[in-house]
Image (spheres, rainbow, N blue to C red):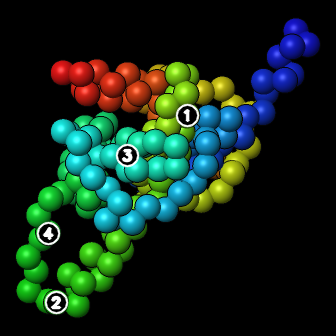
Amino acid sequence: GEDHAEIDEIQYMVTNRGSKHSFAFPLKSVYRLERFQQSEIQKVGDLDVIHYREGNVVLLDHLFELGLSPEKCFSFKKEETKETGGNEGAASSEKKFDEVKAVLVRSKNDRLFAFAVDELNDILISDEKLSKENIDRKGIKGSLYIADQLFCVPDEEYFFQKTLSNKTA
C-alpha cells in the first residue's frame, strides 16, 4: 500500500457549477480553456470544427452528445433562432452565445477536442473515488462529490472515438 497515497487527491476543472449538468474534467487531461467566437465555428459534415493554432479542433457539446434534450444544449447546435415577440429578450439571449466557452482536452493520440461549457468555474481537489453506480448513459465515466456538489466526469475517450468514427462514416 504506499503507492495508493499518490492517487488519493485528484484536481478537477469544474464547469457549469450549480446546474444539473455540472461536469468535472481531470485537470491532467485539460490542455487549456478558451473562448471562441460563434463566427469561428464551421460545419464539417456533422461536426462543429474550429480552426485553432496548430490545426483543427472538433467542438463537442457534451450535453447534446450525451443525448440530453436539445433545449438544454448550447445554441450553436440549433441552426434556427427562436422567434420571440419581445425583441429585447431575443437580443439578450443571442448575445450570450456570441462566444462559446470551451475546455480543450487532448486525446491519447494527441488530437485536441473542445468541450463546450456554459460556465468555467474552479479547480477543485477531490480525494473521492469515482462512483460508477449511477451511470445512466454512455459518455459518462462516473460521478463524484466535490465540495458537497455532484459532478459528472465525462468519458473523454468515448467522445474521441465516437467523433472519429463519425468522420469516416
Q: Residue at x 24, y 84 (%)?
A: 91
Amino acid carrying label 4: it is Thr
Label 2, label 1: how far apart the Cα atoms are: 41 Å
Tag 3: amino acid:
Leu
Pointer 2 with pointer 4, Cβ within 8 A = no
Establish if 120 lies above or below 14.
below
Q: Quadrant of the N terminus?
A: top right
- Label 4 – label 3 distance at C-alpha: 20 Å
- In the rendered view of the protein, which quadrant contains the C terminus? top left
Q: Reading the chain from its start, which is encountered first: label 4 or label 3?
A: 3
Residue 5, picture quadrant? top right
Q: Mark 1 or mark 2, which is nearer the start of the sequence?
A: 2
Mark 2 or 4 closer to N-term? 4
- N-terminal-most mark, 1 or 3: 3
Identify the residue under disc 4.
81
**Mark 4 vs mark 1: in front:** 1
Q: Which residue is mark 1?
A: 106
